[in-house]
């Protein structure tokens, strides 16, 4: 689809399915066989998209997904730790399997709740918006980023108006290998607006995956 004048396009992709916990690094699992099948379908779908730049988190499941997409577009992914998953900050490579199980089991609902070794929803919210600002600053018109469930859900909600003080009462379901497509339009016609206009063209769309490959 052709972009309107003074418009940019951003694709927010969740990585393909991975194991729950990794081996040598508990917080950095590899893709599962089903994840590799999801990735093949995702690569076929994104091959039809015009993409000028790609970014991803530093986790292997996101890098694997981004590199496979990038291979068909002649670009090299920009690795940005700001796109890492919830709790995957600081010395995340040193966390034991027990510590990671505790983090995965943590349920956060209020903005400042957090596990002693983890991250609050408020911190995630701020980190997501900071990563988004860096993405928007890339000198490209069509940009794709590969990130993770909790961060992408929080970012989409923030871009649609959710503030950092909001409690978590529900969540968008963002399947593995799903895509959100956002268009950013200039505000030339109304310079009083605080920023560009965001059009949500699709949210957490997984129609490119066979039904048996759609996983949460």
Image (spheres, rainbow, N blue to C red):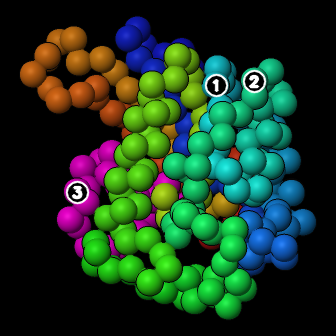
Residue at the spot 22% in from the left edge and 57% down from the top edge:
163
Task: Tell me where residue 107 sits by quadrant.
Answer: bottom left
Q: Earlier in the sequence, mark 3 or mark 2?
A: 2
Task: Reply above or below: 67 against 140.
Answer: below
Quadrant showing the C terminus: bottom right
Q: Position of residue 205 (x, y in %)?
A: 57, 50
The answer to whether marks 2 and 1 mark residues whose Cβ atoms lie closer than 8 Å is: yes
Residue at the spot 21% in from the left edge and 11% down from the top edge:
188
For label 2, the crowd category at 10 Å Cα-Cα, with few meaning under 14, some 14 to 19 and many 20 or more, is some
Quadrant showing the N terminus: top right
**Farthest right residue in view:** 33
Task: Reply above or below: 172 against 135.
Answer: below
Which range is magenta? 152-174
Q: Residue at label 1? A: 53
Task: Tell me where residue 184 sits by quadrant.
Answer: top left
Q: Residue at label 2? A: 75
Q: Is residue 26 magenta?
A: no
Query: Disc 3 versus disc 2: distance between alpha carbons?
Result: 34 Å
- What kind of element bears circle 2? loop
Task: Tell me where residue 95 sits by quadrant.
Answer: bottom right
How many numbered marks, from 0 up?
3
Between residue 147 and residue 81, name the one nearer to us: 81
Q: Residue at label 3? A: 163
Residue at the spot 48% in from the left edge and 76% down from the top edge:
118
Q: Earlier in the sequence, mark 1 or mark 3?
A: 1
């Amino acid at each position: 689809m052709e972009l309107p004048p003074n418009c940019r396009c951003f694709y927010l992709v969740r990585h393909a399915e991975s194991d729950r916990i990794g081996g040598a690094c508990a917080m950095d699992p590899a893709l599962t066989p089903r994840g590799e099948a999801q990735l093949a379908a995702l690569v076929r779908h994104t091959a039809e998209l015009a993409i000028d730049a790609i970014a991803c988190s530093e986790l292997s499941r996101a890098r694997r997904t981004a590199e496979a997409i990038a291979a068909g577009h002649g670009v090299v992914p920009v690795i940005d730790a700001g796109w890492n998953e919830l709790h995957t900050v600081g010395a995340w490579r040193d966390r034991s399997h027990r510590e990671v199980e505790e983090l995965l089991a943590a349920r956060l609902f209020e903005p400042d709740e957090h596990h002693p070794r983890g991250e609050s929803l408020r911190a995630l919210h701020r980190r997501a918006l900071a990563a988004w600002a860096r993405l928007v600053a890339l000198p490209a018109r069509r940009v794709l980023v590969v990130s993770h469930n909790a961060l992408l859900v929080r970012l989409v909600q923030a871009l649609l108006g959710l503030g950092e003080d909001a409690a978590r009462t529900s969540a968008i379901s963002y399947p593995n290998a799903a895509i959100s497509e956002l268009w950013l339009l200039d505000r030339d016609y109304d310079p009083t607006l605080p920023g560009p206009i965001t059009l949500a063209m699709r949210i957490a769309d997984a129609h490119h995956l066979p039904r048996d490959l759609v996983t949460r």
